[in-house]
Amino acid sequence: MEQLVYFDEAGCMSFEFGEGRNVSRYFIVCTVIIKDTLLIKELHDLRLALVGSGHRLLDYFHASEDNVPVREAVFNVICRHDISIQASIFDKHKAELNIRSDRFVFYKIACFSHFKACSALMYGNDKKTLMTFASVGTGKEKTIFQSAVRESIQKTGSNATVTTDFRPSHADHGLQIADYCAWAILRKWERGDDRWHKKLAPVIAFESEHWG
């Protein structure tokens, strides 16, 4: 079976800091290697169970917007399975000026840095790898972001066989898992709240600040 890797980000790419602005200090690039597809089925079954028990859900699992009981249930399912999480942390306060002025450059650098740091985990087992990415941007922007991802993979996984797929998060439970993992890691770095991060800590294989 192909190695399944799901990719998502947390935080925003804006550098317009200031009081009253909803702009994150940190930007997180997160990949999740799912070693057992039963996890994806169980997340689907969880949704059916939650709806059946009267919970009001969004269109799909989304960590920042789901209520606490739903979050607890989703994290409980995720933590029962054999996964591997890799996270790269970028403190935007430390970004150079040329990066701040172009979010496409920033995104490309973030992707390349993450794939380079985690290449042994993502490409090192001689398996074919299917990497699924949460879609970013619309129209021409989407094409530019996808090109940045593909270029980063080519530079860091030259001997690997990697297939890429780009999908909206609501269309894939694997991406919703990556969203939950990225959100928990961002919350620790951004707010100092490690409640949810502690649940994932045993399966976090890599978590590092690149501009530290």
Image (cartoon, helix red, strand yellow):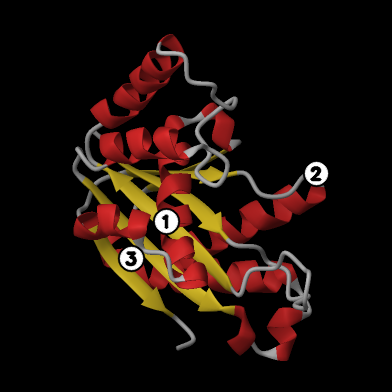
Q: Would you name the residue on which mark 2 appears?
A: 139
Q: Which residue appears at 45% of the width and 88% of the height? A: 212
Vertical arrangement, residue 67 with respect to residue 83, above or below: above
How many numbered callouts?
A: 3
Q: Position of residue 10 (x, y in %)?
A: 55, 58
Q: Position of residue 53 (x, y in %)?
A: 40, 13
Q: Are marks 3 and 2 in contact (CB under 8 Å)?
A: no
Using the image as rendered, state which of residue 142 and residue 147 is in the foreground.
142
Q: Would you name the residue on which mark 3 appears?
A: 119
SS of the residue at dot 3? helix
Mark before the other along the chain sequence, 2 or 1: 2
> How far separated are the C-alphas under marks 2 and 1?
29 Å
* Residue 25 visible in image: yes
Mark 3 residue crowding within 10 angstroms, few (<14) / some (14–19) / many (20+) = some
Residue type marked 2: Gly
Q: Position of residue 166 (x, y in %)?
A: 57, 40
Mark before the other along the chain sequence, 3 or 2: 3
Which label was assigned to residue 184? Answer: 1
Q: Position of residue 27 (x, y in %)?
A: 56, 68
Q: Quadrant of residue 110?
A: bottom right
Using the image as rendered, state which of residue 164 and residue 203 is in the foreground.
203
Q: Along the horizontal axis of the image, is 32 left or right of 210?
A: left
Q: Which residue appears at 40% of the width and 48% of the height? A: 162
Q: Which residue appears at 50% of the width and 65% of the height? A: 28
Vertical arrangement, residue 67 with respect to residue 180, above or below: above
Q: Along the horizontal axis of the image, is 104 left or right of 186?
A: right
Using the image as rendered, state which of residue 180 and residue 169 is in the foreground.
180
Residue type marked 1: Ala
